[in-house]
Amino acid sequence: MKTERQKMAAGEWYTCLDAELDDLRATARSAVHEHNSLPPEERGAIGPKLARLLTAKDAMIEAPFHCAYGINIVLGDQVYLNAGCTILDCATVTIGEQSALGPNVQIYCAEHHQDPVKRTVDGLEIAHPVHIGKRVWIGGGAIILAGLTIGDGAVVGAGSVVTRDVPPETVVVGNPARAIKRND
């Protein structure tokens, strides 16, 4: 029988009301708190506890930052996350090299059950990975929903809500985000 963490990692329905997942979220909260409390001269540096959770090479994360687990975040070289970014990494979130997220960008991997009892009493949710390619720009306040891929060189306009995959070298804007041009 699978644990709730194993179900979450496998992309199956799982309950978030689970002791192991609670412990992992508590570890992430502690790491995020430390990161968000770094002194100003360490602007953009990744706090030591947070660095042990996520996979990052030469990335910068401005405070404040929030993540659910941290262990499912993979940042490529020279990735930049501006202040206020939130990554709810119930599944893997990969952000390719030289990509940048504006302030208050939100990435959600979990979808909650639509049945109110299964959602509220049982805590059922399912998680889908998010993949952001290389050299992507995501404007401030954009929201990226679960299970999506944003292709290399794409641009997501500020305030956009991305509900479907974005092809490489494409500019999308709006709610829901729609393509307005290609960057050929």
Image (cartoon, rainbow, N blue to C red):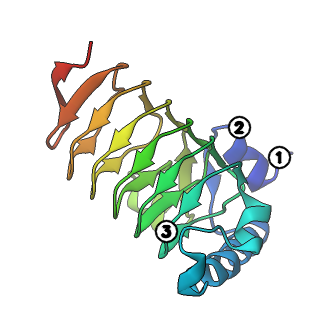
Percent position (x, y) of residue 165?
Answer: 36, 26
Percent position (x, y) of residue 65?
Answer: 50, 70
Mark 1: amino acid: Lys
Residue highlighted by disc 3: 62
Depth order, front residue of 22/93: 93
Give residue 2's mark: 1
Q: Secondary structure at mark 1?
A: loop
Give the foreground label among 2 and 3.
3
Q: How far apart, in angstroms, are the residues tagged by discs 2 and 1? A: 10 Å
Give the foreground label among 2 and 1.
2
Q: How far apart, in angstroms, are the residues tagged by discs 2 and 3? A: 31 Å
Q: Could you tell which of marks 2 and 1 lies nearer the N-terminus?
A: 1
Depth order, front residue of 183/18: 183
Q: Residue furthest top?
A: 184
For the residues bearing labels 2 and 1, Cβ distance under 8 angstroms:
yes
Residue highlighted by disc 2: 10
The residue at the point 79 percent across, 67 percent down is 20
Mark 1 crowd level (few <14, some 14–19, many ≥20, 10 Å Cα): few
Q: Secondary structure at mark 2?
A: loop
